[in-house]
Image (cartoon, grey):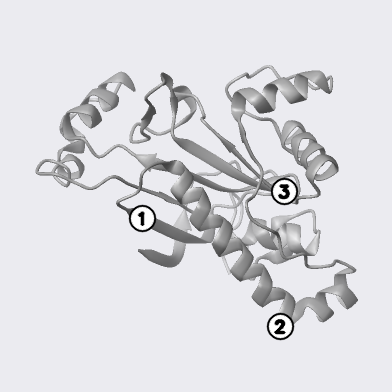
Amino acid sequence: MEKVGPVFRANPSFTSQHDTEFTMYDIKMSFIDSHHDLMDEEENMMVAILTEVKERYGAEIKTTYEQEVIVPKTPFPRLTLRETKRILSDLGITSERNEDLSPEEERAICQYVMENSGHEFVFIHEWPVSTRAFYSMRLESDPKLTKSFDLLFKGLEITSGAQREHRYEQLKKQIEEKGFKVEPFESYLNFFKYGCPPHGGFAPGPTQMLMRILNVSNVREVTYLYRGVNRLTP
């Protein structure tokens, strides 16, 4: 299932890459074996998108923005968060948060991947439970980690995704572990009460993609009508 539509979020919109209203591609897949199936699908999606962009607008982008649209090869590099942190540590780049990546770390790991594999994309997967939503499925080999991923493109996160938990009792348990009461989630849980296939999804942000394709520094430059904390109209 795929859909394209507006999204409204209380994003920290005082940064150069966040806004409070934006368009998102929302992709869901059923009958998957793991989050790697989702990453496989997104790879193919990115290749298709960039192939079309290059064919239609590559010459214009080159003339106007002096940027070459590169169609990536598959498979994309994939690193666990633990592997990523180890590489960054070896590069002398540290962070106060071991369970997340700072903008500096995102840029550094993308530069590392580019220098070592020549690839503009990299998946970072197996994020801790503490940084992911309650519905993210846990890793069987380490329940403190989730079957989730981010896709970075030229130093910027453009997608988050995960295999979602489909087992009713496990979902209830994970809701409670996050400190929530189960009752407000009853209508959501009813979808899983009588069985649901293994599934997951991911949601690329086209404005972040455009920022990297065109090599611009602010999301406002690729947004027709920007909406932020201090701008509601026009």
Residue 99 appearing in the image: yes
The residue under label 1 is: 29
Residue linked to disc 2? 56
Q: Position of residue 108 (x, y in %)?
A: 79, 35
Q: Is residue 225 visible?
A: no
Amino acid type assigned to the residue bearing label 3 in the image: Ser
Q: Which residue is found at the position 65% from the left and 56% from the top?
A: 208
The local secondary structure at tag 1 comes to strand
Residues at marks 2 and 3, CA–CA distance in whole angstroms: 28 Å
Is disc 3 placed on a helix, strand or loop? loop
Q: How far apart are the alpha carbons under marks 3 and 1?
A: 31 Å
Residue identifier under label 3: 16
| Residue 35 shown left or right of residue 75 in the figure | left
Q: Quadrant of the N terminus?
A: bottom left
- Give x and y (percent) for residue 105: 74, 31
Nearest the viewer among 184 and 176 is 176
